Image: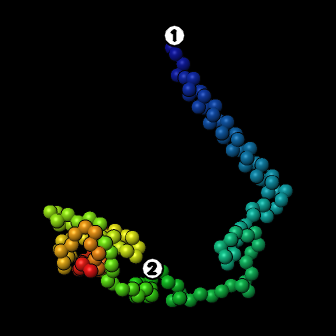
Amino acid sequence: MAKSQQTFSKSEKEKKRLKKREDKRKKMEARKLEKEENGAESIPFAYVDQFGNLTDTPPDPADKVKVKAKNIVLGVPKKEDIEEEEYDPIRKGKVSFFDHSKGFGFIIDTEDQEKYFCHVSGLIDEINENDKVQFELEKGNRGMNAVRVKVI
């Protein structure tokens, strides 16, 4: 005797598909009835006011502000536009660590307690640990480096 080509999973899938189609048809009919009862005003609108808030009332045309395209600035302001603080480029600090065999160390700034890398190539005087020094900062590969280091 030959087996039926219709398996259980196929028949279940077919039932689900027919049920989905029927549900969709019922929803469409319900929307049509609601539209006939309420008229065309069934879909609410949302408006955005001048502050970017959503409202249900349309904006007042009298409050409209015209903006010229040339007044719109895109991007980050240039460095020369930003007022920079005037500060003394020479800073003071204390040598927290220095390895003469490897040629590098670290200096702690007395003002902001930041730790700065110092290489032997940036030294003017010979320095040791716990020496009070004055130095300048320069941007390096991994951050700010202390250069032109002198013992006070």
- Kindly identify the amino acid type of the residue bearing the numbered disc 2: Val
In depth, the one of 128 and 146 nearer the eye is 128
- Number of numbered tags placed on the structure image: 2
Residue that appears at 75% across and 62% down: 43
- Kindly identify the amino acid type of the residue bearing the numbered disc 1: Met
Judge whether residue 33 can be spotted in this image.
yes
Residue that appears at 75% across and 69% down: 56
Q: Residue furthest left?
A: 101
Q: CA distance from mark 1 to mark 2?
A: 80 Å
- Which label is found at residue 81? none
- Which label is found at residue 1? 1
First in sequence: mark 1 or mark 2?
1
Quarter where residue 131 is shown: bottom left
Query: What residue does disc 2 label?
Result: 76
Is residue 21 depicted above or below 36 in this figure?
above
Q: Is residue 120 left or right of residue 22?
A: left
Is residue 57 depicted above or below 83 in this figure?
above
Quarter where residue 52 is shown: bottom right
Residue that appears at 57% across and 23% down: 8
Quarter where residue 142 is shown: bottom left
Q: Is residue 92 left or right of residue 149?
A: right
Q: Position of residue 55 (x, y in %)?
A: 73, 70
- Which part of the image, by quadrant, shows the C terminus? bottom left
How crowded pointer 1 is (Cα within 10 Å; few <14, some 14-19, many 20+) is rated as: few
Q: Position of residue 100 (x, y in %)?
A: 17, 65
Residue that appears at 52% across and 16% down: 3
Judge whether residue 140 can be spotted in this image.
no
Q: Element at badge 2?
A: loop
Tell which tag, 1 or 2, sits nearer the viewer: 2
How crowded pointer 2 is (Cα within 10 Å; few <14, some 14-19, many 20+) is rated as: few
Q: Position of residue 61 (x, y in %)?
A: 72, 83
